[in-house]
Amino acid sequence: MMREVAIRHFGRTTINALDKLGIQIIDTITIPGDGEMPMANGTTGYCVNDNGVGRVLTWQQVKDLAAS
């Protein structure tokens, strides 16, 4: 199920590139923003399994990782 969400957010090409690097997106979270209501203006964070190491990345960081 998470793979389908990841494909919707990034496209199949990006997800396939991550697979070749041994990286999978395993969940999403909200990264709090600033101000009085930080969760209301947060951004999406992507929890990834990077060859056995858990990381939380932004959308752009995931795209950059897939391009490397």
Image: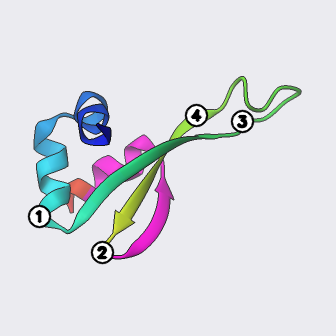
Three-letter residue code for mark 2: Asn
Pointer 4: what residue?
43
The residues tagged by marks 2 and 1 sit, at their Cα atoms, a distance apart of 11 Å
Which residue is disc 1 drawn over? 20
CA–CA distance in space, label 1 to label 3: 32 Å
**Looking at the image, is mark 1 or mark 3 nearer the viewer?**
1
Q: Amino acid at mark 3?
A: Gly
Asked if residue 51 lies left or right of residue 18, the reply is right
Q: Residue 43: x and y, percent?
A: 58, 34
Residue at the image position 32 percent from the left and 40 percent from the top: 2
Secondary element under disc 2, as helix, strand or loop, is loop
Q: CA distance from mark 1 to mark 4?
A: 27 Å
Q: Quadrant of the C terminus?
A: bottom left
The amino acid on which the numbered mark 4 sits, given as a three-letter code, is Thr
Front position among marks 2 and 3:
2
Which badge, 4 or 2, comes first in the chain's sequence? 4
66 within the magenta span: no
Q: Are marks 2 and 1 in contact (CB under 8 Å)?
A: no
Q: Residue drawn 26% across and 28% down?
A: 8
Q: What residue is shown with label 3? A: 33
**For numbered disc 3, what is the local secondary structure?**
loop
Cα separation, mark 2 vs mark 3, equals 29 Å
For the residues labelled 1 and 3, say whether their Cβ atoms are less than 8 Å apart.
Answer: no
The tag on residue 10 is none
> Marks 4/3: CA distance?
7 Å
Q: Indicate whether 62 appears above or below 7.
A: below
Residue at mark 4 to residue at mark 2: CA–CA distance: 24 Å
